[in-house]
Image (cartoon, rainbow, N blue to C red):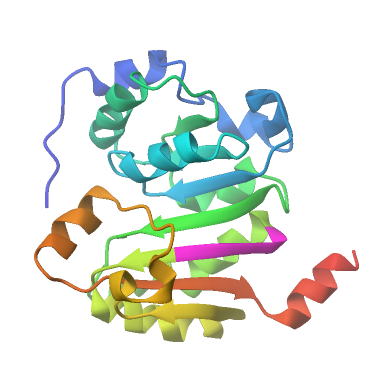
Amino acid sequence: MRLRHIPGAEEAIEQSPYVIQEPKEMKGKWDSVFGNQNPIHIEVGMGKGRFIMELAQRNPHINYIGIERYSTVLLKALQKREQLSVSNICFMCIDAKELGEIFEKGEVKKIYLNFSDPWPKDRHAKRRLTSPQFMAVYDQVLAADGDVEFKTDNRGLFDYSLESIPEAGWKVKEHTFDLHNSSMAEGNVMTEYEEKFSSRGQAICKLIAVRTDKEMKSEGNK
């Protein structure tokens, strides 16, 4: 689906105090951005931001960073952010491939992937956010005991992820093909897409991925 460009979106993003304009300069110094050393959770492809802003309000002792590469979408999230009185959330307008240039090893505690573009054609598989290529990027920034949480309504993408994540050297710690009727539903925060799809009776899939025990032990010994 082609996004309709909103005139002035780029300018509004550049002027917003809630958007980190030079994120690569913050590598290893994110505690100075938030003014504390609380854990950092990021959402890659946050859309209009409902999910991550809800988490920020529920968990004031966690710092949240929403990543959205499309300025038109990010602008809508900014409009919502301006109505919040929290200080533990900011945004970046970047491509997720750049995460290793923005965070130090272990600087991120959790990564959320919600309703990512399925890129259904095989030749585009490497663009999927659960592909081995992207899992390698997450490995560069995630803490040894950190995890990746992924939700989708696309069963094809989910099946692909159940195969690709272990192939990338990670372990699928937990998963379900019907989130809202499973034990994983406890504490679940819905995204805009999730509410829309589930209201139609569509099952939501979710998985949690961690590094293998061997890799975590190796990281802990460094």
**Residue at 14%, 42% in the rendered image:** 3
- Between 38 and 183, the residue placed more toward the observer is 183
Q: Position of residue 36 (x, y in %)?
A: 72, 28
* Residue at x-position 76% and y-position 72%: 216
Q: Residue furthest right?
A: 221
Name the residue at 27% across, 61% down.
117
Q: Can residue 127 be seen in this view?
A: no
Q: Give the range drawn in magenta.
A: 143-149
71 versus 11 height, above or below: below
Image quadrant in which you'd find residue 70: top left
**Position of residue 202 in the picture relative to residue 163 (left or right):** left
Question: Residue 53: within the magenta?
Answer: no
Q: Where does the image place residue 90, in percent across and percent down from the top left? A: 49, 30
- Secondary structure that dominates the magenta span: strand
Location of residue 35 in the rendering, given as x and y in whole percent from the top left corner: 69, 23
**Splitting the image into 4 quarters, where does residue 49 fall?**
top left
Q: Position of residue 72 (x, y in %)?
A: 23, 32
Identify which residue, 201 or 47, lies in the foreground.
201
* Of residues 76 and 98, the one drawn nearer to the viewer in this rendering: 76
